[in-house]
Amino acid sequence: MKGLVYILISVWFAIGVNLNAQEITKKDLIGRWQLGSPNVSDMYLDNYQFFNNDTFKFTPNAYDGLRRLIWLAGTYRIKGDSLMLKVEYSVEQYDGYPEKSHTTTLSGGWEISDGTLIKKTYDNLEDEIFKTKFENDKSILVLDNRKFYKIKDDPNDY
């Protein structure tokens, strides 16, 4: 009997069952999630905001002074252990010029200044599918093996 239990447990782990994984629900997804750290300073790292109306917003690391992509937004849906994101528009910085950064950046001390923000819409993009799970009592959202930490319950709270 012990041999059978050992075999079943071994097979369970061999096929990738995660005993700590928690079911993905919309209720638990709502909020702001930051990549790599639960700590927040004066600017956010890569982060997702998931809203109750099935929309999301992704904002790249604010410390990257040379980024042209300001944010992506669209709709989401949960299907099993997958999160399906469909980008509907982006806000990007157009024009502008590089100059020495007035804040600390990841871009070697450079930033883009005086650019114009433009909204680009996308009509026919496919859903992007992320393998998803929660960890640590749902305070960590894992998207394709990248850990995002819940930093706000209200996605509108800055």
Image (cartoon, rainbow, N blue to C red):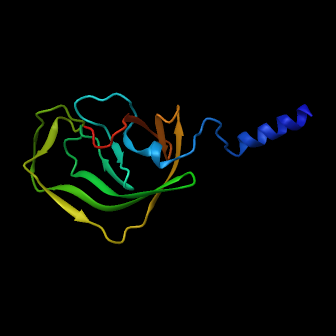
Residue farthest left in this picture = 114
Location of residue 96 with respect to 2 vertically, above or below: below
Q: On the image, which quarter does residue 14 sit in?
A: top right
Tell me what residue is drawn at x 59 percent, y 39 percent.
Answer: 21
Q: Position of residue 34 (x, y in %)?
A: 36, 38
Location of residue 55 with respect to 66 vertically, above or below: below
Q: Is residue 141 left or right of residue 10?
A: left
Tell me what residue is drawn at x 22 percent, y 39 percent.
Answer: 107
Q: Is residue 113 left or right of residue 4?
A: left
Q: Position of residue 129 (x, y in %)?
A: 48, 57
Location of residue 8 with respect to 51 vertically, above or below: above
- Of residues 92 and 1, the one nearer the viewer is 1
Tell me what residue is drawn at x 34 percent, y 42 percent.
Answer: 47
Q: Is residue 150 left or right of residue 98?
A: right
Q: Which quarter of the image is occupied by the N terminus? A: top right
Tell me what residue is drawn at x 37 percent, y 42 percent.
Answer: 31
Q: On the image, which quarter does residue 46 sit in?
A: top left
Q: Which quarter of the image is occupied by the C terminus? A: top left
- Marker count (numbered): 0
Q: Position of residue 62 (x, y in %)?
A: 24, 40
Residue farthest right in this picture = 1
Location of residue 128 with respect to 109 vertically, above or below: below
